[in-house]
Amino acid sequence: MARSRSGRALVMVVALAAALLTGCGPDFSGLHLRIAGGNGGGVYDNLAQVLATAWAGELGIDRPQVLQTGGTPDNLSQIRAGKADVAFVAADVAAAQKDGLAALARIHDDYLHVVVRDDSPINSVDQLAGKTVSIGARASGVEYIAKELLTIAGLNVDRRNLGLQDSLVALVDGQIDAFFWSGGLPTPLITRYTAKTSLRLLDLTKLMPQMQTLSPVYSTATIPASVYGRREPVTTLVVPNFLVVPTSMPDDVAEALTRGLFDARQQLAQANQAALSIDVHPGIETQPIPLHPGALRYFRAEKS
């Protein structure tokens, strides 16, 4: 009988200890987050929507608000103004404005698209001279990189500041001759429009050596022909993307958000194939933006 009472007492102690351990984790129930994404229909926006839902479930918080923005420069402004708590950013722009920023992780890579209609006589970047070209929304990451490339190429074009959707409409309608876009593969809106009107990408091989002298984050890669149903692959510029937060974010919040990001990889990949590259090993590579201490704690725990 004494043994039975002792056994019951042990069960009660174990149950109490488990309850105490469960209760000692951080409580995020009052946390309200705003995520600076990007153009509606772009990869940033696709992933931000999924991540908002994942974080809400993972942390037990209200679903974070996803802000549609002009892209990286706008997102950085939102973070600095205290209007966003998390932002998707391209590494090249963020590297030049890294004060007060910390990274949660490297996520997917962006591929520079220079898009023309399939029936266009333009077959190389140098043939854009004198043409009407959309260089992306004003103060966007696309505009930043488009200006760099046009300067390197020594090209004068009639520049228009249009977002992705408007650029596609204008190209299909013949209002512009080409447009720039920087995004993951595939970019859903481009896929959708390519199914209606045959579009193609310009190869950037000749300009890559000069572009890579501008920033150490730039690299060269191939967009396979199969991505947009084309006959041939094209060589283009690649820039990594980071998920960034203010350095003032508490460590436990940053750690939980980082864990939630990697736990949601399957859902993110279903939303866009660009997220297939989200992985713990490359995720820690965020230089020149330092990792947030909370994110670093997550990565160290994963490697232990």
Image: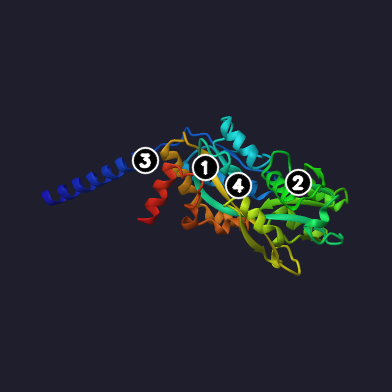
Disc 2 versus disc 3: nearer the observer: 2
- Tell me the element at label 2: loop
Measured in 3D between alpha carbons, the distance from the residue under mark 2 to the one under mark 1, in whole angstroms, is 35 Å
- Residue occupied by mark 1: 56
Q: Are marks 2 and 3 in contact (CB under 8 Å)?
A: no
Measured in 3D between alpha carbons, the distance from the residue under mark 3 to the one under mark 4, in whole angstroms, is 37 Å
Label 2 sits on what residue type? Ile
Chosen colour scheme: rainbow
- Mark 2 and mark 4 lie on one chain; the one further toward the N terminus is 4
Residue at x 34%, y 43% (from the top left corner) = 22
Residue at x 63%, y 62% (from the top left corner) = 221
Query: Residue 23 is drawn in which quadrant?
Result: top left
- Tell me the element at label 4: helix
- In the image: residue 258, left or right of residue 300: right
- Residue occupied by mark 3: 25
Measured in 3D between alpha carbons, the distance from the residue under mark 2 to the one under mark 3, in whole angstroms, is 47 Å
Question: How far from the left and from the top, in percent, is residue 52?
Answer: 56, 43
Label 3 sits on what residue type? Gly
- Mark 2 and mark 3 lie on one chain; the one further toward the N terminus is 3
- Residue occupied by mark 2: 135
Is residue 172 shown above or below 255?
Answer: below
Residue at x 62%, y 53% (from the top left corner) = 213
- Mark 1 and mark 4 lie on one chain; the one further toward the N terminus is 1
- Tell me the element at label 3: loop
